[in-house]
């Protein structure tokens, strides 16, 4: 994801639809000086929330899920007004949250159960070892603008389930939907363990300074700044950052399937998705067929906000400018635009779906995150070349491989340097909440989801060791004689070396 520019905000702001320029709503910005007070209130309320236990919190989350389902139309209308999305794109966000909520409602009790651990060696079996998961008081979430509902809450759900309170800082470009999400939480009868801090850089800094854990989704550059500031207080962070996700199409792929997946993966949400398909490497035998199928599919797309369109506007003129620059630079360097390639006349932050061919890694469209509706396609002569080029990137978020031979595709997947690979599909790993979703290299640190780890990541681990019996306790204490200590150390050494001696033979 591209960086949010630093802006000075007045006390209140007007949010405009980037597709039409119409007023979407008003927002009152948070004074950064108020953030410590908000965090203190959350810290107080969190104690009672934790005391409810996992089962009690699951019931509240269930009521919230029902509220979201009942108010889906309202949320999606506001999404379209705030972001200029098509109705098709806006319709994806609430269902994703409901899937996540349903999973954590089922999983939270198991996630929060103390975990017993075996003794590492027989002579320590006199101890009972248990790991307890204690929620952090305040989890700060700094969310991006591309999915104002899903990205705001997909991490908040795990934190709330764990028993944390959540301080959400939505993007200053899309603050309105967050207000509705907060209203729904309170209307569901939930306690005041969820609050907003509306604003830009200074508010984000205050959230970092007053939280016990930070979940950030956004650009690589901003993620580094978040981590640097959090390090001042040794606050742990999880960063889901930019991507330049490659697709590899092998010569035995279902070309129609791969082409339609590439078009959807590249153009969905106007390309403003961290795991969108940003570059494609196609084996030479099926290259022409693949390109032809892609162009045909792209020519059927309708661009516009609201009902009846496939994808909508980009979030603002800055984002359009990046897309436009990448396309212009590629064409100037010898690439060809088979569709789009030029911004249309008229209002709105629109850029047409653009298929680029004759591209290479000297071009920014293949090396920098575009975050726009472009699809650069490169012909390669071998699988080895495709893998090498796919890995030739500072990013490592996710990727996809298409082949009718699934075992072959899996073998290719395990050569790719990224956090997730989809075989014969795109983006689907984002819905697999039982598995971790995170990036390698500059695409981030840590992961969201991952089964029970999606709850436990927001907790501190506390190990409690208790005796099974008082016999044997104190064998190494100073009150024993030096001879007794020597005998004890000799016995411990002998027992500890038993396994290494067996293995070493």
Image (tube, rainbow, N blue to C red):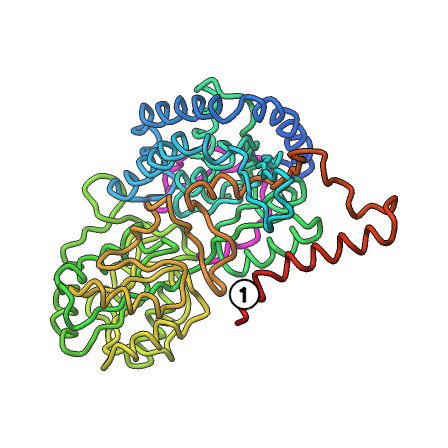
State the residue position of label 1.
502
On whether residue 7 falls in the magenta region, the answer is yes
> Residues in magenta?
1-27
Residue 373 is left or right of residue 110, and the answer is left
Residue 19: % across, % down = 33, 46
- The residue under the point 36% across, 53% down is 273
Q: Is residue 220 visible?
A: yes
> What residue sits 34% from the left and 33% below the top?
98
Across and down, in percent, residue 8 comes to: 60, 47
Q: Residue 362 or 328: which is nearer the viewer? A: 362
Viewer-nearest residue: 57 or 187: 57
Where residue 431 sits, quadrant-wise, is top left
Q: Is residue 459 above or below residue 408?
A: above
- Which of the 4 image quadrants contains residue 339? bottom left
Above or below residue 12? Residue 303 is below
> Would residue 428 appear left or right of 5 to someone viewing this image?
left
Magenta stretch mostly in which secondary structure?
A: loop
| Residue 113 horizontal/vertical position (percent) | 51, 33
Q: Which is nearer the eye, 72 or 20?
A: 72
Residue 211 appears in the rendering: no
Instruction: Classify the position of the N terminus by image quarter.
Output: bottom left
Quarter where residue 43 is shown = top right
On the picture, is 345 further left or further right than 238? left
């Amino acid at each position: 994801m591209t960086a949010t520019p630093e802006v000075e905000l007045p006390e209140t702001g007007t949010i405009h639809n980037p597709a039409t320029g119409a007023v979407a709503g008003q927002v009152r910005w948070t004074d950064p000086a108020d953030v410590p007070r908000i965090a203190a209130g959350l810290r107080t309320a969190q104690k009672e929330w934790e005391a409810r236990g996992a089962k009690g919190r699951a019931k509240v989350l269930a009521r919230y899920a029902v509220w979201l389902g009942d108010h889906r139309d309202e949320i999606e209308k506001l999404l379209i007004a705030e972001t200029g999305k098509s109705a098709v794109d806006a319709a994806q966000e609430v269902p994703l949250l409901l899937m996540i909520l349903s999973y954590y409602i089922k999983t939270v009790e198991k996630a929060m159960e103390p975990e017993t651990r075996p003794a590492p060696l027989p002579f320590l079996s006199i101890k009972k070892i248990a790991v307890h998961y204690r929620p952090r008081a305040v989890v700060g979430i700094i969310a991006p603008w591309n999915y104002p509902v899903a990205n705001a809450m997909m991490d908040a759900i795990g934190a709330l389930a764990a028993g944390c309170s959540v301080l959400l800082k939505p993007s200053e470009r899309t603050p309105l939907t967050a207000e509705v999400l907060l209203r729904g939480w309170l209307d569901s009868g939930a306690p005041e363990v969820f609050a907003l801090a509306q604003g830009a850089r200074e508010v984000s800094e205050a959230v970092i300074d007053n939280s016990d854990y930070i979940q950030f989704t956004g650009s690589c550059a901003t993620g580094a700044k978040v981590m640097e500031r959090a390090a001042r207080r040794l606050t742990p962070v999880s960063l889901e950052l930019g991507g330049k996700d490659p697709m590899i199409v092998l010569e035995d792929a279902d070309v129609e399937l791969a082409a339609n997946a590439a078009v959807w993966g590249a153009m969905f949400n106007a390309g403003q998705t961290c795991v969108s398909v940003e570059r494609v490497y196609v084996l030479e035998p099926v290259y022409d067929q693949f390109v032809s199928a892609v162009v045909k599919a792209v020519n059927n797309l309708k661009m516009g906000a609201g009902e009846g369109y496939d994808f909508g506007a980009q979030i603002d003129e800055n984002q359009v400018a990046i897309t436009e620059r990448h396309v212009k630079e590629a064409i100037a360097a010898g690439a060809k635009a088979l569709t789009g390639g030029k911004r249309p006349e008229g209002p709105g932050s629109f850029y047409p779906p653009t298929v680029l061919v004759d591209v290479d890694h000297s071009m920014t469209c293949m090396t920098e995150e575009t975050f726009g509706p472009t699809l650069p396609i490169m012909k390669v002569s071998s699988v080895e070349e495709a893998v090498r080029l796919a890995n030739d990137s500072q990013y490592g978020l996710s990727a996809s491989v298409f082949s009718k031979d699934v075992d072959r595709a899996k073998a290719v997947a395990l050569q790719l340097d990224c956090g997730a690979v989809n075989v014969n599909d795109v983006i689907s790993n984002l819905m697999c909440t039982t598995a971790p979703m995170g990036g390698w290299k500059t695409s981030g640190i840590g992961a969201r989801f991952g089964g029970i780890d999606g709850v436990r990541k927001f907790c501190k681990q506390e190990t409690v060791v208790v005796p099974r019996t008082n016999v044997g306790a104190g064998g190494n204490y100073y009150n024993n004689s030096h001879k007794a200590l020597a005998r004890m150390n000799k016995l411990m050494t002998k027992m500890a070396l038993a396994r290494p001696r067996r293995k070493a033979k």
